Image (cartoon, rainbow, N blue to C red):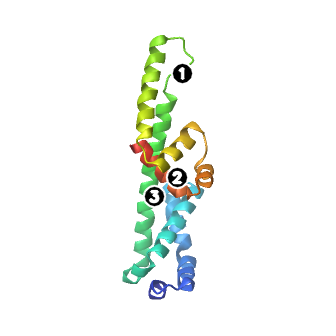
């Protein structure tokens, strides 16, 4: 199947998908404990496999290859989620601008100015995704539709923005 897939055979890919889908999904579900996330990871594993089809003939053990691919994607997604969670916790601890304390208001304005300066330094797509998410309150799906890019690209833009 791998040799046929390397030659571009979609039917070989479909057969491989049918044989290994459940194993990849189950592995992702075991680690993530979240069905939708496990499904996203499994789909991404097979998408990457198809995108790299020219090199799949070199794979010696498909089970191991797919497991390692899933594991790597799981770790990547989990680290992004930790970063997003830390950002949300940071936002939750921000002072309200409605307080009567002039010192807090001044500090908030200074922090907001620093943040705005940093946002303007981002590449345009990251900047737009960040603003739509954090200022517009849109979900990744809504942003992907509005920007005309994949949900994965939106997540990547936002994670890179937060990291920056």
Name the front one of labels 3 and 2: 2
Q: Quadrant of the C terminus?
A: top left
* Mark found first going from the N terminus, 1 or 3: 3
Residue placed at 46% from the left, 38% from the top? 87
User: Callout 2: 10 Å neighbours few (<14), some, many (20+)?
Assistant: many
- What percent of the width, then of the height, locates residue 13? 53, 81
Residue placed at 48% from the left, 17% from the top? 105
One can see residue 60 in this view: no
* Mark found first going from the N terminus, 2 or 1: 1
Name the front one of labels 2 and 1: 2
* Mark found first going from the N terminus, 3 or 2: 3
Name the front one of labels 1 and 3: 1
Q: Nearer the viewer, residue 23 or 18?
A: 18
Residue placed at 42% from the left, 44% from the top? 122
- What percent of the width, then of the height, locates residue 157? 47, 50
- What percent of the width, then of the height, locates residue 109? 46, 22
Marks 2/1: CA distance?
A: 28 Å
Q: Secondary structure at mark 2?
A: helix
Give yes or no for contact between labels 2 and 1 (Cβ–Cβ under 8 Å): no
Q: Is residue 34 left or right of residue 83?
A: right
Residue placed at 55% from the left, 15% from the top? 99
Marks 1/3: CA distance?
A: 36 Å
Marks 3/2: CA distance?
A: 18 Å
Label 3 sits on residue: 74
Q: Quadrant of residue 114?
A: top left
- What percent of the width, then of the height, locates residue 66? 44, 71
Q: Which mark is residue 96?
A: 1
Label 2 sits on residue: 154
Is 134 rendered above or below residue 64?
above
Q: Secondary structure at mark 3?
A: helix
């Amino acid at each position: 199947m791998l040799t046929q897939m390397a030659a571009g055979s979609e039917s070989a890919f479909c057969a491989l998908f049918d044989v290994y889908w459940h194993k990849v999904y189950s592995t992702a579900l075991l680690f993530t404990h979240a069905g939708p996330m496990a499904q996203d990871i499994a789909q991404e594993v097979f998408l990457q496999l198809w995108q790299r089809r020219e090199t799949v003939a070199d794979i010696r053990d498909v089970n191991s290859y797919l497991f390692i691919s899933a594991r790597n994607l799981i770790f990547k997604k989990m680290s992004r989620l930790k970063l997003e969670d830390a950002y949300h916790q940071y936002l939750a601890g921000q002072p309200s601008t409605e307080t009567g304390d002039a010192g807090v208001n001044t500090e908030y304005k200074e922090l907001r100015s620093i943040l705005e300066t940093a946002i303007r330094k981002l590449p345009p797509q990251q900047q737009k995704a960040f603003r739509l998410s954090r200022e517009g309150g849109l979900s990744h799906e809504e942003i992907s539709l509005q920007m005309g890019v994949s949900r994965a690209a939106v997540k990547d833009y936002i994670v890179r923005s937060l990291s920056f």
